[in-house]
Amino acid sequence: MCRPTPETVLVTGGGGFLGSAVARLLAARGDRVSSFSRGMHPELARHGVAHRRGDITDAPALARACEGVDVVFHTAAKPPPWGPPADYRATNVTGTENVIAACRTQGVKRLIHTSTPSVIFDGRDMEGVDESAPYPARWESHYAATKAAAEQRVTAAAAAGLAAVVLRPHQVWGPGDPHFVPRILARARRLKRIGDGTNLVDTTYIDNAAAAHLLAADRLREDPALSGRIYFISQGEPIPAWEMIDAILAAAGRGPVKGHISHRTARFLGWACEGLYRSLRLPGEPPMTRFVADALARAHWFDISAARRDLGYTPAVSTAEGLRRLTAWFQRRNSER
């Protein structure tokens, strides 16, 4: 494939883990890239990324940021697993509606929307599921519910004429990850295996997730018929969930998880913790939720053949190589302290 002609690009949530990786890749190949986020991120400037400061819920600010833009990568979101419902709706749903409106107002040619496989997770095992899987009757988290609503807004906009593709990268991780890896490390001493430990899960190394976004934009440019499509993105090599968690702990120089509780017990604890935190309005995040219990005990891996076929997606960085890179990153960070 020939190198695409440079374009003017906006990345919402460009200061985030995935957004910054996407922005850096775009800048490295010669696109004119701006990041739209609430905070300042000087490290992006070193890669030639301009900064437009604003909140995703501020429709006029977002519209101004989209002026003259060819492609928007919408990666901004309120992450799981816990928080006020209004916050999730404001960022994930209203924010996405604002992105769509700005694209229409400013004549943006293409929109690549970052979603999540959580939108179809119903608490049961999901093995080799493809994009035809329906949404569940109900969701166990505000994150999944609002990301599903956002995804539906994007596909509806695509049906109405906006060129858009939805990506569902699963459990993005790697050096600098501010969510998945730190959560594991913070709970390392009290972590216990949930379930029988045989459940396979998908993950996505950060470089692969970012590359998938560029592929989606480029392929949509070449083939507008892809508009409205949804694609799962992952390593394409499911791994036992607790084996992956132990590997991340090992990369950080920690020992493996010891001890075990049943999925049923973990779910009960999640239900109790959720109720306690809601009724007492406790700050922070409950030590367990039903969503997390299900995610750690159930299989959830997905068929990425559609992304391979339509986008030319191939996970260039294997899980083993990603773990080597994560180990090296921890070693460098520790040596600098």
Image: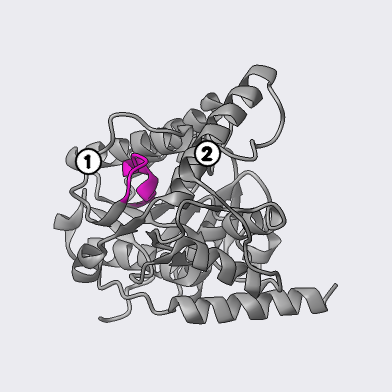
Question: Residue 178's spot in the image, x, y percent?
Answer: 63, 56
Residue pictured at 32% horizontal, 68% vertical: 215
Q: Which mark is residue 134?
A: 1
Tell which of 181 and 297 is nearer to you: 297
Left or right: residue 42 compared with residue 62: right
Left or right: residue 192 compared with residue 236: right
Residue pictured at 68% horizontal, 21% vertical: 281
Q: Is 269 within the magenta? A: no
Residue pictured at 46% horizontal, 34% vertical: 141
Picture quadrant where residue 315 is located: bottom left
Amino acid under disc 2:
Thr
Whether residue 3 is visible here, answered yes or no, is yes
Amino acid under disc 1:
Pro
* Distance (Cα) linking label 2 and label 1: 28 Å
Mark 2, mark 1: which one is toward the viewer?
Answer: 2
Q: Is residue 233 above or below residue 74?
A: below
Q: Is residue 320 above or below residue 7?
A: below
Whether residue 23 is visible here, answered yes or no, is no
> Sequence-wise, which precedes: disc 2 or disc 1?
1
Tell which of 148 and 242 is nearer to you: 242
Tell which of 83 and 313 is nearer to you: 83
Question: Residue 33's spot in the image, x, y percent?
Answer: 50, 62
The magenta stretch is: 112-125
Residue tagged by mark 2?
Answer: 265
Q: Is residue 255 above or below residue 135?
A: below
